Image: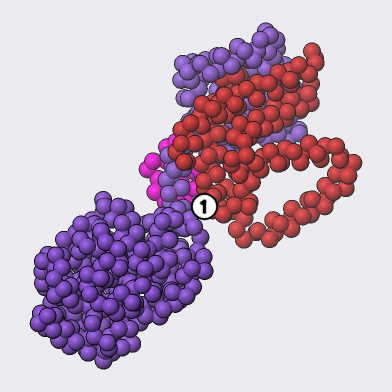
Amino acid sequence: MNLQSSSSNPNFLKLRFTKGFLRALMRIYRHRSKSSSSPREISQRYRRIKLAADASMALAVGSRRLWSRAVLWRIRNQVRNRHVFVKRVSSHAIKKRAQKKKEEQYHLAYDDQENKLRKLVPGGAAMDICSLLDEASHYINCLTTQVKMMRRIAEICS
Amino acid sequence: MSGQENEDLGFQHRSESILNCPSSGMTTSHLPEKVSGMTISSLPVFKPSNGADPFFGSGWDPLVSLSQSENFGGSSMVSHGELSNPSYSVVLESQGMNSTSHLVQYPSDSNFVEMVPKLPCFGSGSFSEMVGSFGLPECAGIANSGCPPNFISNKEKGTERASTFGAQSQDGRETEDAGIGSSPSGKRRKRVIDSNSPFSTNKNAEGEQQKDLSGESSDVMKELDGKKLKIEENTSGNLRSKQSGKQSKDGSHSEEAPKENYIHVRARRGQATNSHSLAERVRREKISERMRLLQELVPGCNKITGKAVMLDEIINYVQSLQQQVEFLSMKLATVNPELNIDLERILSKDILNSRGGNGPIVGFGPGINSSQPYPHGMFQGTLPTIPSTAPQFTSLPQTVLDNELQGLFHMGFDSSSAIDNLGPNGRLKSEL
């Protein structure tokens, strides 16, 4: 089943990803003003494009994979958090403290390879090593497709 | 019936010797001593004597299963050296069955693997028929009471085994069946008695007998000489239902949880058969399998052996891929697609169809991987060179780049700066 999904994946994945990504790109380019020289705007656009790339990739994969679900969940939370911006200011400090505590807790295995991989693969913190490796392989597969397609787009655009 | 008497006599001798050690008599360790002297082709036969009836009742199942499996496999007859219940004699021969003509007295082996004689009637007929042919009312009585479900299950199991292990070596099959048959000891007695009661009720029974099976077989494998065997079975619904008759109280093999999709693993020869180590071995094999898959995905990792190095490579590769995504998104952000009105259509067609443009890009890929530590170290060095390479880009973002770099640098976009550093290189390469 893994083989089937991986073999049939490239084409469908490409299609779905490019469709979604191009649509998002169009939307982003439509919104840009003529004077697009300010670095702030560019960085903002960069962030949006990056988000669009991740989101379209995750959508192309769907909820079949843990990592795609984690990405979609994260994006959804980000969108929600934007609306609750006022509250976030105070909770930001709390977040930092919580993060520090967590880091201290995991200090022993902090530089472990496994933990590094967990950090890299979205949603990897909640997986056991077996499924982590599984998800990592699929994630690498999708990332390579993403990179390929984005390069082509960049090539054509520029 | 003289033949039968002789058989019975010989059989009684054996049974006496066995009866002397009632509790331990069924252990496999004792079997070689007793059986070595005997030349019997073991058959699942009901002993007509009264004394050993409990033996029969307890020990019938494995032998029935054994015989059936061997029968369905169409295997030849070999004497079963170490049998759980050597008291089973060749009474069948005396019964005048056709199959008995095939029975030959092979020398008994201490080798457990040798199999059980084939009895065509086993394969075709039902249990009651077989018993009827024996002409042993006791057998029929016992059979009808407790064994039919076991028999049916065993018979089915036999077919299943024959079909699944058709490709496997005979030895493997024999070992397996022998393992099942031999585990007997005193456990069998208790087990069959228990099997009748909770048979219909327990769902866990299936799981338990799976445990039983795997546990027994693992125990047996440990004690076997000779055959090195590893069988991994995927438990199917059929298999479980067949084994429903056998249940085990053996709680030590608790690692085989009664799950439907659990994979059976046999302990290899010379390996620990502890339940924990078995589970660990399965886990390790899964992990190594996944690592192999990953090795194929990550380029340039064919020669790497070792989990740690492989993991490092994987981590680096994932990091580099993510950085590439960021770089490309930054590039797309700076690019100005004014000319593309039907952007989507053009892009989709070109992108999906273009494969020739992949060459230089592919060459760029490994460059990034190898130069992954490169950008961070070289950033300060190449910072002044970036404005010089800026003309490579379109004229519009040239001034933007300088400003942007400074702005981004202040903002702490390390990734983007690295990306911009790579940008000129990539551009150069792609143009070349």
> What is the quadrant of the C terminus of chain A in the image?
top right
Q: Would you call the spot at circle 1 few (<14 residues within 10 Å), some (14-19), or many (20 or more)?
A: some
Chain A hue? red
Q: Is residue B223 left or right of residue A23?
A: left
How many numbered marks appear?
Answer: 1
Q: Where is residue B270, by image quadrant? A: bottom left
Q: Which chain letter goes with mark 1? A: A
Whole-percent x, y for residue A41 in the image: 78, 23
Query: Closer to the camera, A96 or B247?
Result: B247
- Bounds of the magenta segment: B299-315
Disc 1 residue type (three-letter):
Cys
Q: Where is residue B11, by image quadrant? A: bottom left
Q: Is residue B247 left or right of residue B142?
A: right
Whole-percent x, y for residue B77 in the image: 16, 64
Residue B322 among magenta residues: no
Which residue is under mark 1?
A: A130
User: Residue at the spot x=48%, y=31% of the render?
Assistant: A8
Query: Closer to the camera, B251 or B99?
Result: B99
In the rendered view, tell whether residue B263 sits above or below residue B202.
above
